[in-house]
Image: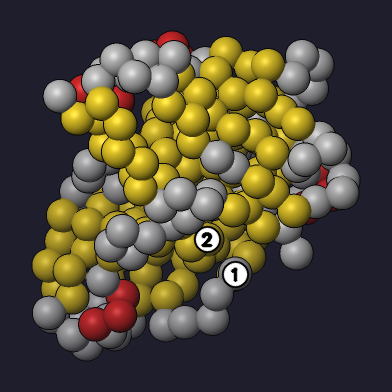
Amino acid sequence: SQTIHQWPATLVQPVGSPLSLECTVEGTSNPNLYWYRQAAGRGLQLLFYSVGIGQISSEVPQNLSASRPQDRQFILSSKKLLLSDSGFYLCASGQGSNSPLHFGNGTRLTVT
Amino acid sequence: AQSVTQLDSQVPVFEEAPVELRCNYSSSVSVYLFWYVQYPNQGLQLLLKYLSGSTLVKGINGFEAEFNKSQTSFHLRKPSVHISDTAEYFCAVTSRDYGQNFVFGPGTRLSVLP
């Protein structure tokens, strides 16, 4: 079965600082990878998804970016964090629309 | 665009009582439906899924859901809840026609009271 690793689990960063969150997947190959953000008490907002190495689709224009340097590695980045970037970031992996997503344990980001 | 509605943002229920969490989706195409559970500060865990076949789907932890195409609903039920079922529950929908996009509902907070 798939295992999604995310780190760090929690992160506190000042406004204007850079960000790099990493997600790696075990137990599958050529997955579709996703970054979601969950604001406090809210649902999931899809930020980016990738169907292969170097292929990134952005769902929401913002100061975040994503990269997929390897098949099972997905990175979320920012050059300068905003207060509004605070939230719970979830990485997910899937194998198509008729296959459920598997989620990592998330990173709680607080921008101060 | 595809959307998912979970009408109840919070559902309080006493231990051992039955519960139903409602989910409706907007789509006329063939869909795949999922229910996930999220415990505090954790990722989402799959409860059950509907891909095709029988409209009554059984999942983990005693939960089940029924797909109703005419009402575009996929309500989640459990006949007797436990304190440990206290969590956030998310309904999600996807379709072959929507590429790789999974659309999630806003979630329902289930609180099981002693």
Q: Residue at x 42, y 75 (%)?
A: A64
Q: CA distance from mark 1 to mark 2?
A: 6 Å
Residues packed near mark 2 inside 10 Å, few (<14), some (14 to 19) or many (20 plus): many
Q: First in sequence, mark 1 or 2: give its number.
A: 2
Q: Residue at x 48, y 62 (%)?
A: A45
Q: Which mark is residue B85?
A: none
Q: Amino acid at mark 1?
A: Glu
Residues packed near mark 1 inside 10 Å, few (<14), some (14 to 19) or many (20 plus): few
Q: Position of residue A9 (x, y in %)?
A: 19, 48
Task: State yes or no: discs 1 and 2 in contact (Cβ < 8 Å).
Answer: yes
Q: Position of residue B39 (x, y in %)?
A: 27, 36
Label 2 chain ID: A
Horizontal relation, residue A20 to residue B71: left or right: left
The image quarter containing residue B16 is top left
Q: Is residue A52 visible?
A: no
* Quadrant position of the N terminus of chain B in the picture: bottom right
Q: Are marks 1 and 2 on the same chain?
A: yes
The image quarter containing residue A38 is bottom left
Secondary structure, mark 2, is strand
Residue that carries the numbered disc 2 in the rendered image: A46
- Count the labels in the image: 2
Horizontal relation, residue B15 to residue B109: left or right: left
Q: Position of residue B49 (x, y in %)?
A: 61, 25
Residue that carries the numbered disc 1 in the rendered image: A59
Q: Is residue B75 visible?
A: yes
The one nearer the camera, A23 or B97, is B97
